[in-house]
Amino acid sequence: MVIAKAWALKKHFDGFPKTSDFDLKKIELPNLKDGGEQKLLLESVFLSVDPYMRPYSRRDMKEGDIMIGTQVARVVESKNPAFTVGTFVVAGSGWRTHFISDGKDLQLLPSSWPESLPKSLALGTIGMPGLTAYFGLLEVCKMKPGETVLVNAAAGAVGSVVGQLAKIGGCKVVGCAGSDDKVAYLKKIGFDEAFNYKSVKSLDEALHKASPDGYDCFFDNVGGEFASVAINHMKKYGRIAVCGAISQYNDSVPQKGPYVQLPMIFKELQMEGFLVSRWNNRREEGLQALLKWVMEGKVKCHEQVTEGFENMPMAFIRMLKGENLGKAVVKV
Ligand code: NDP
């Protein structure tokens, strides 16, 4: 019999999450059976901490539920011939060290995944955040060679891939992030212009200086005040992909305008919100493209690895505070 550890949401977050909002539980798992749903026992190897967990916890969870989330897990016992012991999968089983599955919701890593490549990348660049960058740029921003792309939270899991894919697509890329170290990293991985939005005197001036002609595409991970300023720097017929609004996730009182209508009308902009799940039917295409670019060295990956399952709440809080460079993951 296996005892799994799992993190539950003890109390709904009020403002910024605190470690006291979480509860570490022990759950006794049943033994596997030949029929029914208890066919596989898996152990989490890497777990993801993502911004969406903050707004989705409020929308989809009640107090006492195990935190939502995905992991790279290894099959440790199997009564399902499709998954032999030792197989690595991506699962959406929440913040748990071990879990039981019938196999239906497990995703195998792409078959061409090289042994040398860390499997944790299946939670980042070659996983959901990478796919978000890929489809957001291609299908929502509809970027074209020669255009200028702006991305915020640019040194994070999604943003760092957005910038590099836009470079592969022949665009000029401007990124901003919340520390000088992050800005140095953006320049290292090929961003044409990068600045620290926390230390510039004027965001308006910094955006103008980075691209005096304005921006064709804006991949918005942040929303709020940044987006309100950036919209005035769009070129005519510019496209804005509304990917995330992390500047608002911890607000107890909703922020108020400025409002978008006037710049949208005068510049004839397109602004489209999206969820990466819209392209679930093209997941394999996206993963294969990202894997290829990573193997060719055209897309660089950085991970912020926190050691120890007991540190999951801290890793989540640190990511929300911006202490991660690249994808924040937890190694069990
Ligand atoms: P990141 O790895 O980018 O981590 C979050 C980053 O957000 C922090 O490192 C921090 O970077 C930045 N940040 C935090 N608070 C603020 C703030 N108040 N103002 C500005 N920046 C802030 O996370 P992801 O790459 O996983 O996600 C990026 C965004 O994309 C999120 O908004 C997320 O919800 C969204 N998303 C949307 C998806 C979709 O399907 N639409 C799918 C996946 C992600 P810094 O130091 O630069 O401030």
Image (cartoon, grey):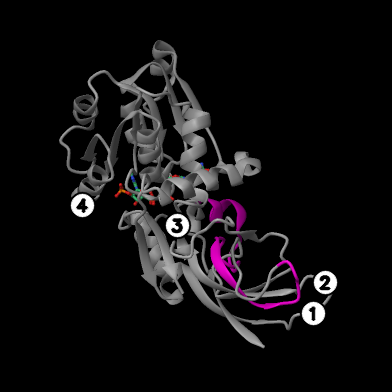
Residue indicated by mark 2: 36
**Residue lying at the far right of the rendered structure:** 35
Question: Is the Cβ of the residue at disc 3 closer than 8 Å to that at disc 2?
Answer: no
Cα separation, mark 3 vs mark 2, equals 40 Å
Give neighbour class at mark 3: few <14, some 14-19, many 20+ (Cα, 10 Å). few
Residue 24 x, y percent position in the rendering: 51, 77
Which numbered disc flags the more N-terminal residue, 3 or 2?
Answer: 3
**247 and 176: which is toward the camera:** 176
Residue indicated by mark 3: 14
The answer to whether residue 256 is seen in the rendering is: no
Query: Magenta stretch?
Result: 55-82
Cα separation, mark 3 vs mark 4, equals 30 Å
Cα separation, mark 1 vs mark 3, equals 42 Å
Q: Which label belongs to residue 274? A: none
Position of 302 relative to 263 (above/below): below
Residue indicated by mark 4: 181
Residue 104 x, y percent position in the rendering: 73, 61
Cα separation, mark 2 vs mark 1, equals 7 Å
Residue type at tag 2: Gly
Which numbered disc flags the more N-terminal residue, 4 or 2?
Answer: 2
Question: Is the Cβ of the residue at disc 3 closer than 8 Å to that at disc 4?
Answer: no
Question: Is the Cβ of the residue at disc 2 closer than 8 Å to that at disc 1?
Answer: yes
